Amino acid sequence: MRTEPATYEPGTVLYDTAAAKVGEYRGRSGARVLLRPLGGGREWEAEPPVLRPATDRERLGASLRAANDRTLATPPAPAELERPPLPVPGCEACAWLAERRETARAAFDHSAVTDANVLLRQHQRKEHEG
């Protein structure tokens, strides 16, 4: 007696035991099944007998790997690449915060440098609209 292969709904998360990979069911290609990695990527074909529903642990692991891959592939935001703010000429508060930053930098106190930059940006947004 011949058994029919299991049918899956598109989007079902399956584990390919032959490839040791988790993938999302995309459809059929003849007698084979098309799977795509969670989070996107190149599809692959698998034989239906080597597929089974992914466990929660397998699904979570594949989702975390996909999220990590996206994070590593995303370039830093422009704000992370900005140079330290410059003091507005003639502003005593800006000059004081810039001096505080330079004193911290000379003492290799990177936390205080960051604090001074944050305070200088906040001051400039509030007092100088920029």
Image (cartoon, helix red, strand yellow):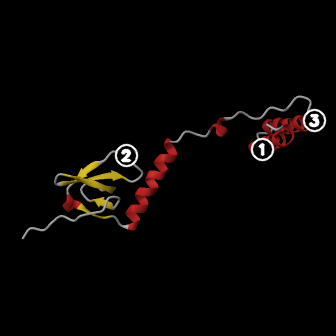
The local crowd at label 1, few if under 14, some if 14 to 19, many if 20 or more residues have their Cα within 10 Å, is some
Q: Could you tell me which quadrant the N terminus lies in?
A: bottom left
Q: Is residue 30 left or right of residue 125?
A: left
The local crowd at label 2, few if under 14, some if 14 to 19, many if 20 or more residues have their Cα within 10 Å, is few
> Is 39 placed above or below 60 here?
above
- Which residue is drawn at the image coordinates 22% and 60% (left, top)? 50
* Picture coordinates of residue 49, whole percent (x, y): 19, 62
The outermost residue toward the bottom is 1
Dot 3 falls on a residue whose secondary structure is helix
- Which residue is drawn at the image coordinates 63% and 37% (left, top)? 78
Q: CA distance from mark 2 to mark 1?
A: 39 Å
Q: Earlier in the sequence, mark 2 or mark 1?
A: 2
The kind of residue on which mark 2 rests is Gly
Q: Are marks 3 and 2 in contact (CB under 8 Å)?
A: no
* Picture coordinates of residue 4, whole percent (x, y): 15, 66
> Residue 41, which numbered label?
2
- Number of numbered callouts drawn: 3
> Residue 95, which numbered label?
none
Q: Is residue 67 left or right of residue 38?
A: right
**Residue at which label 1 appears:** 118
Q: Earlier in the sequence, mark 3 or mark 1?
A: 3
The local crowd at label 3, few if under 14, some if 14 to 19, many if 20 or more residues have their Cα within 10 Å, is few
User: Looking at this view, is 106 or 130 the one in front?
Assistant: 130
Q: Earlier in the sequence, mark 3 or mark 2?
A: 2
Q: Quadrant of residue 124?
A: top right
**Residue at which label 3 appears:** 92
- Which residue is drawn at the image coordinates 92% and 30% (left, top)? 90
Dot 1 falls on a residue whose secondary structure is helix
Q: Could you tell me which quadrant the C terminus lies in?
A: top right
